[in-house]
Structures are given as C-alpha cells and as structure tokens.
Amino acid sequence: MEDKMVELMGKVCIEIQSIKQTETDLKNELSSIKDDIKKLGEQMHQDLSSKSQDSSKESNQSGDFGDKLDGIDEKVDRLRMDINNLSMKAEYNDNRLIEVTRDLKKSGKQDKQQN
C-alpha cells in the first residue's frame, strides 16, 4: 500500500512539474507576444506618421494606406486572439495545479489517518 502511495505521489509530482513547465512556457510565449505587439504598435505609429506625411503630398496613396492599415488591424486582431488563448491556457493550468495540489494534500491526510 505504501509503495503505491509513493508511486502515486511520484506521478503527481511529475504532473505538477509538467504543469509548472507548461505554465512557464506559456508565460514566456505571452511575454514574447506582448513584445511583438509593442513593436508592431511602434511600427504602426511610424508607418502612420510617414504615410500621413506622404498622403498630404500625394492623394493617390490614400487607397494604399487604407489597405495597409486594414492589414495591420487584422494582424493586431490575430495577436489579440493569440493572447486571449494563451491567457486561457495559463488560467487552466493554474486551476489544474491547484486541483492536483489539493488532491495530493487529501491523499496525504488519508494516509496519515489510516496509519
């Protein structure tokens, strides 16, 4: 019985480590995406500034500017969806880690009561 508990606790520890690593990976990925969004925002600002100056000089470029702005909007929307997806995954992993920890504590208490 004790061997099974040790084996179960080992599996739970491995699962917790896996969840923690996944959470760390997700946080790193989310940080990277935030950096990408910041860079994209800076690039958009530069593009908008240069395009607004150019559009005052040449009215024909206004159509191209709108197309590029639409493309940037689509990229920002996709990045937002990715961030939301990663946030949900991180939240799920946080909740799963809490559940596993709670289950581990319960099994430890039950072991003590049986002994």
Image (spheres, rainbow, N blue to C red):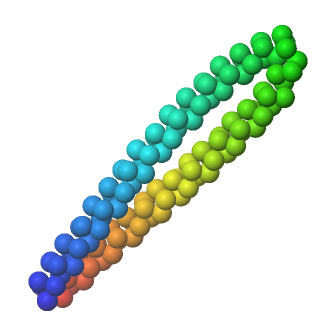
**Rendered residue at 84%/24% (across/down):** 62
Residue 13 higher or lower than 56, as above or below: below
Is 115 or 52 nearer to us in this picture? 52
Name which quarter of the figure residue 109 lies in: bottom left
**Rendered residue at 53%/58% (across/down):** 88
Residue 22 higher or lower than 78, as above or below: below
Q: Is there any visible trace of residue 91 in the rendered image? A: no
Which quadrant of the rendered structure holds the N terminus? bottom left
Q: Is there any visible trace of residue 81 in the rendered image? A: yes
Is 92 or 41 nearer to us in this picture? 41
Number of numbered callouts drawn: 0
In this view, which residue lies farthest toward the front?
60
**Does residue 48 appear left or right of residue 38 in this picture?**
right
Which quadrant of the rendered structure holds the C terminus? bottom left
Is 27 or 56 nearer to us in this picture? 56
Q: Where is residue 66 drawn, in percent x and y? A: 80, 31
Residue 3 higher or lower than 15, as above or below: below
Residue 19 higher or lower than 51, as above or below: below
Is 43 or 21 nearer to us in this picture? 43
**Does residue 34 appear left or right of residue 78 in this picture?**
left
Q: Where is residue 30 drawn, in percent x and y? A: 48, 45
